[in-house]
Image (cartoon, coloured by chain):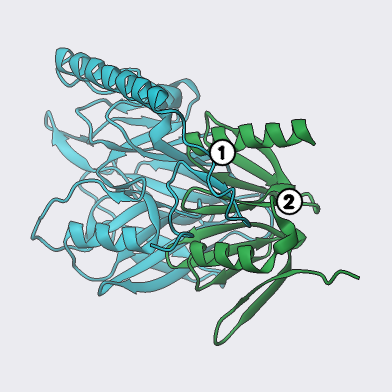
Amino acid sequence: MDKFDNIGENEIRIIGTDHQEKQPEPPKRRTRYFVAVVLAVLIGVLVVFLIRGCNDEPSAPAENNCYKKVCEEDQGPSYVQIVDTIINNVSLHQYIPVNAKPKLVMGLLKEIPSQYILGAMAADIGLIQDKYQVIGAFVYHGEMKSHSKSKFGFCAILKDTMVIGNELTTSYFEQAIAEKGDFFRQNALIHEGKIVNKLLAKNKALRRSLCLMNDGRYCIIDTDMSVTVDDFAEALRQYGVREAISLMGSGAALRWAEDKDGRKHIAGADEYEFPDAVNYIVWEKSL
Amino acid sequence: MQEQEYLMVSTSTEMIRLREENVVCITSDGNYSHICAIGGETFIVSSQLGQIERLISEQLHSSYGYFVRIGRGLIINMRYLCYINVTRQKLYLLDSSGKKYVQDASREALIQLKKMTENKNGNG
């Protein structure tokens, strides 16, 4: 392996000389101590989880495994940059919002408001106790709408800052309630640049995901061809996605994007069976 | 008079030539790298970050200590490092035009970077 590629995620090195390549790793004893503490905490969390019978969202801060992006200063017009690419014969369309703020919207949109330049249906909906409800924990503007057994992936929006992660328990849930933010759950596809779980599923469908790229930009990526979830996740990983969670409903669910010339690119359609539970992740124009 | 050093990245179809002090940071995007220049201009080059690191090492001889590789995905120019938050796993770079660049890095890497910067300032 080239020495310039030989660096771990937790290492730094000064560029320019061979005699001072790597900063020393923390001492092994400290590492062992750290591993022991992490194991103890994991066991503790597991025990608490089992005792509580899989109740959703116990409070346990877990920010280390999440990534968030501080919104950059707004300047210039708001639009969606669209990038088309093919990875491993999987055709991907990437929608990157520029100068726009993320938020959740709940309730059927009969028309797409002009201030929302990018959006897609977000959390899954299912029939729970004879009523269509959001599946997984869901907080809308600080109000808890759903608290059912959750998926591991999550998205939180707190004061225009988006966070995507893969944690069964996360303090962002409580934070979303306390700070009148938004929170929803979905299946995680990529975490820390790695595929979360190989499902080995054979069924093919149009796929869509909410992603954080390695360069720190958030975007929506979808396919215009039916692929397995594993092939989709592998394509995302190779494309440079650091974190990704699924978005609702493959080809049937609505997704729209307004490009720099003001053209709208729309895929899917709204579901009318459960208008109250329909929810969207959208990016609103910065004023 | 000492000749000015440039970071030059050249492919069959394009060439980027920047003075060391005009490079703020370089981020990895798979097989591509994004070179952020002062003022916010970003150049995308079809070279992996390791190849850019090699070019910096080979071309910018008098810039030792300015460029630091942080993990697999980031190279920063230490001239512009202004803020590290280990808890939030963030670092900010502030260029001479006042533009702020926010980057993610691992907690462990940021702890090392913070310590290294403190030592450097202390010795300087």
Q: Which of A63/A153 is in front?
A: A63
Q: Is residue A120 left or right of residue B48?
A: left
Q: Is residue A119 visible?
A: yes
Q: Which of the labelled discs sits on residue B90, or is there none?
A: 1
> Do tag 2 and tag 1 residues touch (Cβ < 8 Å)?
no
Q: Quick one: which residue is furthest to the right in this view?
A: B1
Residue B84, position as x, y percentages in the image: 62, 35
Q: Colour of chain A?
A: cyan
Give the residue displayed 42% in from the left and 32% down from the top.
A64
**Which residue is labeled 2 in the image?**
B99
Give the residue displayed 37% in from the left and 30% down from the top.
A139
Q: Which of B51/A86 is in front?
A: B51
Q: Is residue A184 left or right of residue B23?
A: left
Q: Secondary structure at mark 1?
A: strand
Q: Quadrant of the N terminus of chain A?
A: bottom left
Kindly identify the amino acid type of the residue bearing the numbered disc 2: Lys
Does residue A255 lie above or below A264 as drawn? above
Q: Quadrant of residue A269?
A: bottom left
Q: Is residue A72 visible?
A: no
Q: Which of A255/A277 is in front?
A: A255
Q: Secondary structure at mark 2?
A: loop
Mark with earlier residue (2, 1):
1
Which chain is disc 2 placed on?
A: B
Q: Quick one: which residue is furthest to the bottom in this view?
A: B12
Kindly identify the amino acid type of the residue bearing the numbered disc 1: Lys
Q: Which of the labelled discs sits on residue A50, or is there none?
A: none
Which chain is disc 1 placed on?
A: B
Q: Is residue B3 left or right of residue A171?
A: right
Separation of residues labelled 2 and 1 (CA atoms): 16 Å
Q: Which chain is displayed in green in the rendered image?
A: B
